[in-house]
Amino acid sequence: MAKIFRLILLLLAYVSISACADELATLNWLKVNESYFELSLPNSFKKVVMHGEDSFVGEYKSETITLSFDYGPYSDTLQNKHNHNQYKEWREQINGHEAKMVTYTKSNTEFVMAIHFPKGGQPYKSGNKLTVFSIYHSKRDYDVVREIYKSIRFKE
């Protein structure tokens, strides 16, 4: 009986993951070129005009996700985020670049995922770093943000 129950759970997990992957594939993704890097976003995102004082900053919004970035020598290194609820941290390679990823809960309906690249591509000679923050509201949004982060490529 326990084996049947585990088999059913495994099957349900597979169907859920497949449905999510299919849903992500149906989004119309656009490549966005920023000055020092590029990333892919669903076409529902709209650019918000921003101006940084000591770095290159930007923001994109959809109905359920806000994504902002900071590229410069003083970008947030995500060092002081560990005191947030449900905090998780890990390292990952994104298109050949070492990155620190964090997730945490901001409120009951708002979640955060952030990624920090301590060496921001070829212009790193000047010490530039890239940090991207996303605020989102659901598991589907989490998957979209993960895909966006996996698409980040530095202009070398």
Image (cartoon, rainbow, N blue to C red):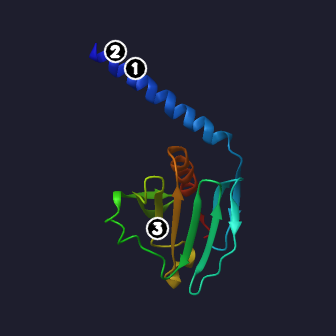
Say whether residue 86 is left or right of residue 63: left
Under circle 3, the secondary element is strand
Q: Which residue is mark 3?
A: 116
Q: Residue at x 30, y 17 (%)?
A: 3
**How far across and how far down the image is residue 24, in percent?**
61, 42
Q: Quadrant of residue 156?
A: bottom right
Amino acid on which the number 2 mark rests in the picture: Ile
**Mark earlier in primary sequence (1, 3):** 1
Q: Are marks 1 and 3 in contact (CB under 8 Å)?
A: no
Residue 140 falls in image quadrant: top right
SS category of the residue bearing label 1: helix
Residue furthest left as drawn: 2
- State how far apart marks 1 and 3 are (Cα): 38 Å
* Residue 152 can be seen in this image: no
Q: Please report contact status of discs 2 and 3: CB closer than 8 Å, yes or no.
A: no
Q: Is residue 132 above or below residue 150?
A: below
What is the distance, in whole Å, between disc 1 and disc 2 at their CAs?
A: 6 Å
Name the kind of residue labelled 3 in the image. Answer: His
Task: In the rendered view, tell whether residue 6 sits above or below residue 28.
Answer: above
User: Residue drawn at (35%, 63%), measured in percent from left and top?
Assistant: 84
Pointer 1 residue = 8
Quadrant for the N terminus in the image: top left
Q: Secondary structure at mark 2?
A: helix
Please give the residue where the numbered disc 2 appears in the rendered image: 4
Q: Is residue 63 visible from the viewing direction of this image? A: yes
